[in-house]
Amino acid sequence: MRVRQFRAALGSLVIPLLLLACPAHAEPYLAVETGLKCGQCHVNPTGGGLRTAFGDAFAQGVMPQHHLDTGADTWVGEINRFLSVGGDLRFDGQYQTVPGSASVDSFALEQARIYLDATVIPNRLAAYVDEQVAPGGALNREAYAMYWSASHEWYLKAGQLYLPFGLRLQDQTAFIQTTSGISMTTPDQGVEVGWEHKAWDAQFAVSNGTAAGPEVDHGKQYSGQLIYVEPQWRLGLGMNVNDAAVGSKNAVALFGGLKTGPIAWLAQAELVDDKSIPDDGGRMLATLLEANWLLARGNNLKITSEFLDPDRNVAHNEQTRWSLVYELTPIQFLQLRAGVRYSDGIPQDDSEHVRLYFVEVHGFF
């Protein structure tokens, strides 16, 4: 058993390091598949949220299996040259089994979000809002002002924003998201400076470090990443330091993407040291390796392998997750997903042996 766990850890760590490829977000494999930067399809330079006119055109002309003819009425998100809107809705059904417990099946509205971008000075100054309107009450995810330099190489953001650090995945429960605590469910309030020059991208943010909650001390969170993008591959290095009174939390990530024929690969290896956990128990390792196989236009098969060592001072406590997801985009702005995810951990802990089956409807515009 010890040999098996060692091989799993070694494989999950070494393979991503050998691939050395991709920064990305929400659906980062699309950036790797096309060889484009995330800011090509999204208003946010670091990806996710409202799509640009190019992104809307991509969602209609490239992504779907079939394009329904709408004549001259083509959606590009623009109300006028100053104002753009968009949105996402995800609804799913799940069936989950855990040894020793009753199985659970449910339907749930995962999220409904509205995006609004007001470009008050074209290509220079904009105000942006990402609002989750369901389930429950309204919940702000992002709300910031962004100023671009005349050369469009530098920008400054101020407000509530997603932090720049590694892959920004659709699955917010991935080990590389929960270990670092940085995901699209944990924005923070602060400022971000970005630089884009040819193949290079860089972002650096200073924020409260409270996941958009009220500030409680003088400590701040520092997040940054440096990314190099080529048409066939990309490589990024991320860092995060949260200087909190209860104990600092430091993280470093190597992440990337690689395109090999019809397969777009994503990989990330992440080390975390959380000083708020006593007895030096916050030294963690998380890795992800994902293959996205474009079987045919509008048909993507996603296979993901994850590894987590939640305390590197303790032996035999590693966890793994395997996911198999089929994504069908039959027409523009509609995606159907079906998959299975298996989590495995300490043999004697039934809660770490979970099978999850799910189907999802994703509408976006």
Image (spheres, grey):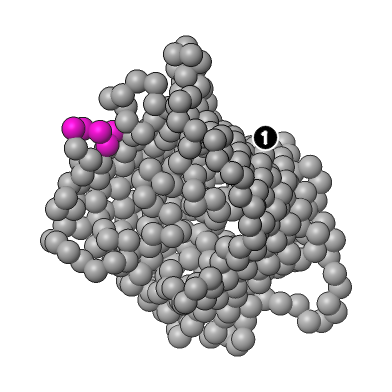
What residue is drawn where x is 85% and y is 69%? 68
* Quadrant position of the C terminus in the picture: bottom right
Residue 26 in the image, given as x and y percentages of width and height? 54, 55
Q: Amino acid at mark 1?
A: Thr
Q: Is residue 198 above or below residue 289?
A: below
**Residue at the disc numbered 1:** 260
Left or right: where does residue 207 sit relative to residue 294?
left
Q: Is residue 363 above or below residue 197?
A: below
Q: Nearer the viewer, residue 139 or 257?
A: 139
SS at mark 1 in the image:
strand
Q: Find residue 155 and report its image quarter.
A: bottom left
Q: Is residue 81 above or below residue 109?
A: below
What residue is drawn where x is 45% and y is 84%? 121
Q: Find residue 114 and report its image quarter.
A: bottom right
- The main secondary structure of the magenta stretch is loop
The magenta span reads 279-283
